């Protein structure tokens, strides 16, 4: 069976779409990174922080209402934060500190971990970069399992700690993803049998993404991460302390910020959960705007089914009566969807929509 990494290798990238600029060496936003300003999409158009301000729900996973609240949040917005998630704060700090250790290296050291044109892991610009004619104020480091090969290039004698922390974090995130998914299934009134749970978990596709958004001399012109939805089932995001920048798009409200909450992790629905829920849960469109004062760091964990798993509306959700419940998507393997998304970005969902 193909790995997630192999699913990506069939869409090779050009080097210009891999190497980030050396943010340390620029004093102003270069043309290549200056995004056109339109009324609606302008990063300058910040959410009005006074007034009735939107905040995504925070759910205490130890609460007896956690299932109901998480399910409801998936339905209403496709995003929420969780506390009492069981990830030790010491591990979150360690992941952050190892990520800093990497991103604060000089550019010539970071490129030793450069993603290869047909590869899926390593250092580079955002995966969605080829879809935009401007570059983002962002650099990333993607891992799928052990980062050993890349880490050894960067720190021939000091790679161990980095690897240990990243592997430990991925193990714990996997368990948390499974716990959250089980809660969501329960909310939907489904049993693990309805989604072939053992197989879904057997060779889960997962990725860990370190994101760095350096300080930006003119954040109004720049884009940290362009609007997108996440591809897999769900994403768990750790944002460092007070550095906000993540925004979600809400009908009628436009772009609204997701403020970091100390100790909480952000969870969002991805395309595959949107598909499996037969569109009951929105795959939330989100973006990141950079800041003038803070170098922002985030750690995203993406969880999905094995590459040969067929993703489609879950039977139990579609076989009840009436048109309302008819399947809205055709079923597709994870591998095919990942490739379709890599080639078509936001058009991918509509390509499998049947009604
Ligand atoms: C992502 C993402 C948000 C952030 O990595 O897909 O949306 O705040 N990250 O870094
Ligand atoms: Ni995302």
Image (spheres, rainbow, N blue to C red):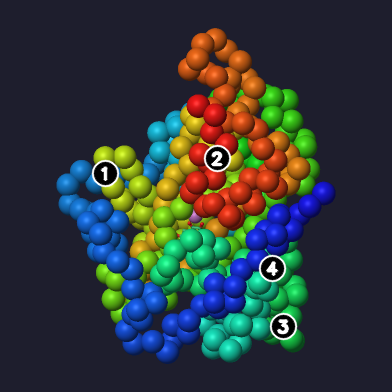
Q: Nearer the viewer, mark 1 or mark 2?
A: 2
Tell me the distance, in whole angstroms, between the alpha carbons under discs 1 and 2: 27 Å
Q: Position of residue 269 (x, y in %)?
A: 51, 42
- In the image, is residue 100 above or below residue 107? above
Identify residue for label 3. Answer: 153
SS class, disc 2: helix
Depth check, front residue: 262 or 122: 122
Residue 351, disc: 2
Ranked by sequence position, the earlier of labels 1 and 4 is 4
Tell me the distance, in whole angstroms, between the alpha carbons under discs 3 and 2: 40 Å
Identify residue for label 1. Answer: 253
| Among the 4 quarters of the image, the one containing residue 317 | top right
Tell me the distance, in whole angstroms, between the alpha carbons under discs 4 and 3: 18 Å
Depth check, front residue: 102 or 231: 231
User: Tag 1: Cα neighbours inside 10 Å, few (<14), some, or many (≥20)?
Assistant: few
Q: Say if mark 1 contacts mark 3, CB within 8 Å.
A: no
Q: Position of residue 23 (x, y in %)?
A: 44, 82
Identify residue for label 4. Answer: 118
**Residue visible at 33% across and 54% down?**
257
SS class, disc 3: helix
Ranked by sequence position, the earlier of labels 4 and 3 is 4
Ranked by sequence position, the earlier of labels 3 and 2 is 3
Extreme residue toward the top, this view: 321
SS class, disc 1: loop
SS class, disc 4: loop
Tell me the distance, in whole angstroms, between the alpha carbons under discs 2 and 4: 24 Å
């Amino acid at each position: 069976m193909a790995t997630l990494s192999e699913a990506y290798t069939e869409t090779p990238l050009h080097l210009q779409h891999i190497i980030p600029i050396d943010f340390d060496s620029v004093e102003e936003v270069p043309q290549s990174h200056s995004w056109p300003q339109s009324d609606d999409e302008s990063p300058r158009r910040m959410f009005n922080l006074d007034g009735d301000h939107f905040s995504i729900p925070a759910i205490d996973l130890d609460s007896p209402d956690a299932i109901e609240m998480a399910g409801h949040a998936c339905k209403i917005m496709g995003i929420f934060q969780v506390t009492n998630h069981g990830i030790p704060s010491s591990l979150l700090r360690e992941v952050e500190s190892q990520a800093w250790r990497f991103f604060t290296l000089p550019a010539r050291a970071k490129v030793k971990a450069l993603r290869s044109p047909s590869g899926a892991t390593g250092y580079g610009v955002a995966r969605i970069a080829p879809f935009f004619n401007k570059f983002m104020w962002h650099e990333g480091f993607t891992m799928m399992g052990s980062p050993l090969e890349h880490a050894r290039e960067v720190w021939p004698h000091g790679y161990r700690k980095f690897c240990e922390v990243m592997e430990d974090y991925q193990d714990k995130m996997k368990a948390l993803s499974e716990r959250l998914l089980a809660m969501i299934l329960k909310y939907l009134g489904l049993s693990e049998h309805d989604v072939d749970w053992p197989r879904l978990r057997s060779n889960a596709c997962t990725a860990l993404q370190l994101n760095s958004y350096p300080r930006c001399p003119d954040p109004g012109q720049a884009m940290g991460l362009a609007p997108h939805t996440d591809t897999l089932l769900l994403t768990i995001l750790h944002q460092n302390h007070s550095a906000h920048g993540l925004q979600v798009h809400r009908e009628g409200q436009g772009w609204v910020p997701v403020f970091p909450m100390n100790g909480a992790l952000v969870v969002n629905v991805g395309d595959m959960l949107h598909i499996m829920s037969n569109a009951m849960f929105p795959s939330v469109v989100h973006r990141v705007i950079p800041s003038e004062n803070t170098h922002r760091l985030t750690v995203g964990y993406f969880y999905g089914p094995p590459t040969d798993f067929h993703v489609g509306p879950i039977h139990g959700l579609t076989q009840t009566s009436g048109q309302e419940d008819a399947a809205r998507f055709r079923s597709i393997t994870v591998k095919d969807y990942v490739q379709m998304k890599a080639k078509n970005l936001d058009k991918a969902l509509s390509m499998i929509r049947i009604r």
